[in-house]
């Protein structure tokens, strides 16, 4: 058997126990600044391994999450059906249909589909039709959301930030600031002692704080960017709206390659202060 025949046998799976990976012509695979993989392919796409993705897209076919796979993706788009046999966590799914097998588990925040098919033992959490609908619901239950332990004590000093060079939208663009009720509470900003405050944040700023808290702990931002996020968190927690209005543009300008969620926070603050 010549060299060419041996290579052909290996590609076809003959004489080897290793599975073969075929990347169809026209497939685009990229890695973003946060280290998340994006796959865009013209035909069907099957995900068999667990992983974190930015975008999974099938231009003309379907996407399938196999039974043993636990997949997290910011965006999933396909022309036909998104099949879930395993576990899927996604910010947004756009497809002709979403089909959940009997043992499937799906956490989908936003979905744009014509049909939704759910197996008898499947579980679906989320399923909002738009970001405005999601924001409206969270606004109605703002008090309950504020009571959740989302503000964990970090107590991270400047030395830790300098030593750690570490590298999915609750806000509706253009949302008007809502009237905020007043209540006394105790909060803690990163690296600061607890202090009492006497007023709640308006909902756009409150959800901005929730997102900033989450982004602060992501490994995708370096020490300089995290320091800027920390300053924004401190201003929001201290309810220093005057200081925030004067400095938020400068602070955001020093964040290196802010992700989509941070960009939404910036637009929300723009809308709030300019409104």
Image: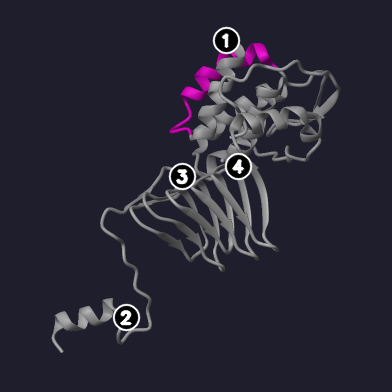
Distance in Å between CA atoms under marks 1 and 4: 29 Å
Residue 246 in magenta?
yes
Residue indicated by mark 3: 34
Residue 56 in magenta?
no
Residue indicated by mark 1: 274
Tell me the magenta residue range.
Answer: 240-258
Residue indicated by mark 4: 217
Ranked by sequence position, the earlier of labels 1 and 4 is: 4
Q: Viewed as shown, does residue 177 lie left or right of 198?
A: left
Ranked by sequence position, the earlier of labels 2 and 3 is: 2
Distance in Å between CA atoms under marks 3 and 1: 31 Å
**What is the crowding at mark 1: few (fewer than 14 residues within 10 Å), some, or many (at least 20)?**
few
Give coordinates of residue 73: x percent, y percent: 52, 49
User: Residue, x 67% and y 16% (percent of image)?
Assistant: 177
Residue indicated by mark 2: 13
Ranked by sequence position, the earlier of labels 3 and 1 is: 3
Q: Residue lying furthest front in this view?
A: 114
Check whether the beta carbons of the residues at disc 4 and disc 2 lie within 8 A of each other: no
Give coordinates of residue 269: x percent, y percent: 59, 19
């Amino acid at each position: 058997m010549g060299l060419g025949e041996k290579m052909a046998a290996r590609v076809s799976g003959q004489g080897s126990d290793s599975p073969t990976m075929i990347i169809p012509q026209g497939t685009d695979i990229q890695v973003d600044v946060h280290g998340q993989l994006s796959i865009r392919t013209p035909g069907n796409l099957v995900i068999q391994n667990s992983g974190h993705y930015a975008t999974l897209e099938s231009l003309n076919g379907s996407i399938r999450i196999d039974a043993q796979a636990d997949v997290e993706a910011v965006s999933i788009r396909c022309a036909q059906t998104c099949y879930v046999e395993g576990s899927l966590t996604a910010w947004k799914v756009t497809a002709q249909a979403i089909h959940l097998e009997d043992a499937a588990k799906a956490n989908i925040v936003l979905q744009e589909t014509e049909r939704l098919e759910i197996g008898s033992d499947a579980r679906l959490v989320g399923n909002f039709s738009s970001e405005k609908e999601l924001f409206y619901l969270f606004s109605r239950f703002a008090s309950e959301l504020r009571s959740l332990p989302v503000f964990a004590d970090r107590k991270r000093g400047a030395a830790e930030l300098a030593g750690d060079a570490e590298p999915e939208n609750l806000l509706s663009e253009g949302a008007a600031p809502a009237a905020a009720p007043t209540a006394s509470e105790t909060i803690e900003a990163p690296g600061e002692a607890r202090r009492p405050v006497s007023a709640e944040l308006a909902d756009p700023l409150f959800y901005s704080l929730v997102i900033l808290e989450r982004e602060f702990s992501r490994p995708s931002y370096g020490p300089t960017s995290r320091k800027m996020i920390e300053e924004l968190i401190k201003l929001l927690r201290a309810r220093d709206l005057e200081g925030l209005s004067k400095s938020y543009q400068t602070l955001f300008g020093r964040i290196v390659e802010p992700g989509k969620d941070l960009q939404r926070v910036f637009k929300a603050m723009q809308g709030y202060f300019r409104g």
